[in-house]
Amino acid sequence: EAGVTQFPSHSVIEKGQTVTLRCDPISGHDNLYWYRRVMGKEIKFLLHFVKESKQDESGMPNNRFLAERTGGTYSTLKVQPAELEDSGVYFCASSLLQNTEAFFGQGTRLTVV
Amino acid sequence: AQKVTQAQTEISVVEKEDVTLDCVYETRDTTYYLFWYKQPPSGELVFLIRRNSFDEQNEISGRYSWNFQKSTSSFNFTITASQVVDSAVYFCALSYLAPSGTYKYIFGTGTRLKVLA
């Protein structure tokens, strides 16, 4: 069974550009989460989808970040325009039920220069 | 507020030594879940264990064991007879039910374990 897959694994962009990260959850997992780890700090919650609906997006830093999950399958996280402080590792996770273990992808390392 | 503290930033041990990774958490919730994840050099977070707040029974899985003590709000992780392949960053996490209805993870800052041959 395939795990959570994230694309790309690395992305280097210039300040002001747009980047879109993609996450393919484990098949059948309705719950999809985005987390972010900024250099040297904790991994922090960004948002949670249940199927295609946003259950909680309280962790989204600002309106430059837009997450979608059309059809309740894969999800995208767009950063537009990117700023230097957006650099970090973006993790996606999925779970079968909300209070069960979440399975994480390998992360997308985003560097904004 | 919820918080997870992993005071050990980095630990180095020689192969075959035992090593304990500490995790202390804070929460006012009575129902919560505790996790350990391993992050090898490849980057993904690998699930190791999940405990709910009502189950303080310690668990052993091969060379791994976990000691959950609510009295001290700790959930420590011990690797017995460490191996080079155990080298990774280990994250402790607390999952709690937020007002939104979402179970959110609060992660510690991680402990980097280096096992030397």
Image: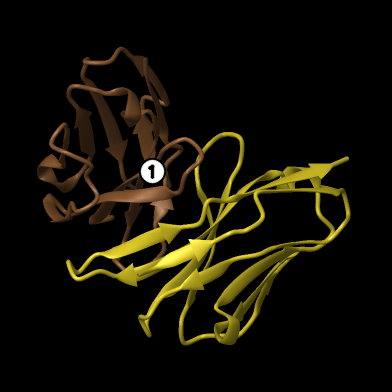
Chain colours: A brown, B yellow
Residue where numbered disc 1 is placed: A4
- Taking the view exactly as shown, the residue that stands out farthest to the top is A14
Check disc 1: other Cα within 10 Å, few if <14, some if 14-19, many if 20+. many
Considering the image in quadrants, where does the N terminus of chain B appear?
Answer: bottom left
Give x and y (percent) for residue A77.
22, 34
Does residue A2 lie above or below B35 as drawn? Answer: above
For the residue pair A112 and A25, the one nearer the viewer reads as: A112
For the residue pair B97 and A14, the one nearer the viewer reads as: A14
Secondary structure of residue under mark 1: loop
| Residue at the (47%, 35%) spot, across then down | A39
Considering the image in quadrants, where does the C terminus of chain B appear?
Answer: top right
Give x and y (percent) for residue A13.
32, 14
Give x and y (percent) for residue A82.
24, 23
| Residue at the (36%, 24%) spot, across then down | A8
For the residue pair B45 and B30, the one nearer the viewer reads as: B30
Give x and y (percent) for residue B3.
44, 65
Does residue A38 lie above or below B58 as drawn? Answer: above
